[in-house]
Image (tube, rainbow, N blue to C red):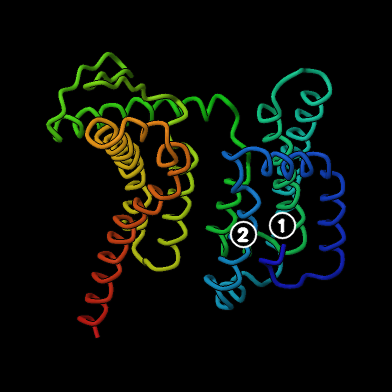
């Protein structure tokens, strides 16, 4: 709530009450972020949203977002409150009754919490602060833990896409390759592009990074969009390069490479490598905007 200008004690009291009511799903989210590598970024999202509001949107956005609540906003509050209560009810029903993985229902509780916080803001400040900080508010959607259907779908897409790109890369190295679906047979080596190699978390973090970078450094909306969409092919290229490098080193240097630390702990290294072309594209877009701005002056 630090993203909005002071609106009196009642706003803060109601926000605190909503947080207390939603303490159970928030505690589960905290534990999930500590246990699950896929969800380890969740706790950073509110801080990123606050940073955007405080330091990127700046005082100008706060002033534009100031003012009295709009007429008729009560109907909007009622609808948001109804939606938030519905998601929370769904969370408690699934939490108490069905024996499901926590990711299958926790997102409903967190979404209900965010909607009720939104009700508090709209109730006391109107819709203007939401519009003034639209990006920061939308960024909070990444605070929701992903259910298995979503993660499985992303994993399958990245797994198959990485296998296709790796197939092309391996053949470019001159290695003889015999492929059967996700299996690659190389001289003295058989590898399988497993679902664990899809890099869902790395691609998701790369996507969030691109959104933040676009917001911070770019003005044109289409350039921000291109920068964000570029993370998909970059994620596939990162995975394929990792597969190709490990395979080539295992065949030509040391067969133990495929079982070594570069394979099992090398994810951060390849993630950093994928940042290089992303920031290169960002630099190009930023430079083009600077040149155009100077030309206008």
Residue at the far top: name it: 180
Residue at image location 43% in from the left, 44% down from the top = 266
Compared to residue 182, the image places residue 261 above or below, namely: below
Give how far across and how far down residue 16 sits, in percent. 85, 56
Quarter location, residue 213? bottom left
The tally of labels here is 2
Residue at image location 62% in from the left, 69% down from the top = 65
Look at mark 2 in the image and give the residue it sits on. Answer: 130
**Marking on residue 55:** none
Quarter location, residue 164? top left
Residue at image location 76% in from the left, 39% down from the top = 28
Residue sitting nearer the eye, 108 or 134:
108
Q: Quadrant of the C terminus?
A: bottom left
Look at mark 1 in the image and give the residue it sits on. Answer: 122
Give how far across and how far down residue 206 sits, in percent. 43, 49
Q: Is 89 positioned to the left or the right of 285 in the image?
A: right
Residue at image location 77% in from the left, 17% down from the top = 98
Q: Label 2's element?
A: helix
Residue sitting nearer the eye, 68 or 261:
261
Give how far across and how far down residue 87 sits, in percent. 73, 34
Q: Residues within 10 Å of mark 1 (few under 14, many from 20)?
A: many
Q: Residues within 10 Å of mark 2 (few under 14, many from 20)?
A: some
Q: Is 49 positioned to the left or the right of 287 in the image?
A: right
Q: Is 149 positioned to the left or the right of 247 in the image?
A: right
The answer to whether marks 2 and 1 mark residues whose Cβ atoms lie closer than 8 Å is yes
Q: Label 1's element?
A: helix
Q: Quadrant of the N terminus?
A: bottom right
Compared to residue 9, the image places residue 244 above or below, namely: above
Going from N to C along the chain, the mark reached first, 2 or 1, is 1
Residue at the far bottom: name it: 297
Quarter location, residue 162? top left
Q: CA distance from mark 2 to mark 1?
A: 8 Å
């Amino acid at each position: 709530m630090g993203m909005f200008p002071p609106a009196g004690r009642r706003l803060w009291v109601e926000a605190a009450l909503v947080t207390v009511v939603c303490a159970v799903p928030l505690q589960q989210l905290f534990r999930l972020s500590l246990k699950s590598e896929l969800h380890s970024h969740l706790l950073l999202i509110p801080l990123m949203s606050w940073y955007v509001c405080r330091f990127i949107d700046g005082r100008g956005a706060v002033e534009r977002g100031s003012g009295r609540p709009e007429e008729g906003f009560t109907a909007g509050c009622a609808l948001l409150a109804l939606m938030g209560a519905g998601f929370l009810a769904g969370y408690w029903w699934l939490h108490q009754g069905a024996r499901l993985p926590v990711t299958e229902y926790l997102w409903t509780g967190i979404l209900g919490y965010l909607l009720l916080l939104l009700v508090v803001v709209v109730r006391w400040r109107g819709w203007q602060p939401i519009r003034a900080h639209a990006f920061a508010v939308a960024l909070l959607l990444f605070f929701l833990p992903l259910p298995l259907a979503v993660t499985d779908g992303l994993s399958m897409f990245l797994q198959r896409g990485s296998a296709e790109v790796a197939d092309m890369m391996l053949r470019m190295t001159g290695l003889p390759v015999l492929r059967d679906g996700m299996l690659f047979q190389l001289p003295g080596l058989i590898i399988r592009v497993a679902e664990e190699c899809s890099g869902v978390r790395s691609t998701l973090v790369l996507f969030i990074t691109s959104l933040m970078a676009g917001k911070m450094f770019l003005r044109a909306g289409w350039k921000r969009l291109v920068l964000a969409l570029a993370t998909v092919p970059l994620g596939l290229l990162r995975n394929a390069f990792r597969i190709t490098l490990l395979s080539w080193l295992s065949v030509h240097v040391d067969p133990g490479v495929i079982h070594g630390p570069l394979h099992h702990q090398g994810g951060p290294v390849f993630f950093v490598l994928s940042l290089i072309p992303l920031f290169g594209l960002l630099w190009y877009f930023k430079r083009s905007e600077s040149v155009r701005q100077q030309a206008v002056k």
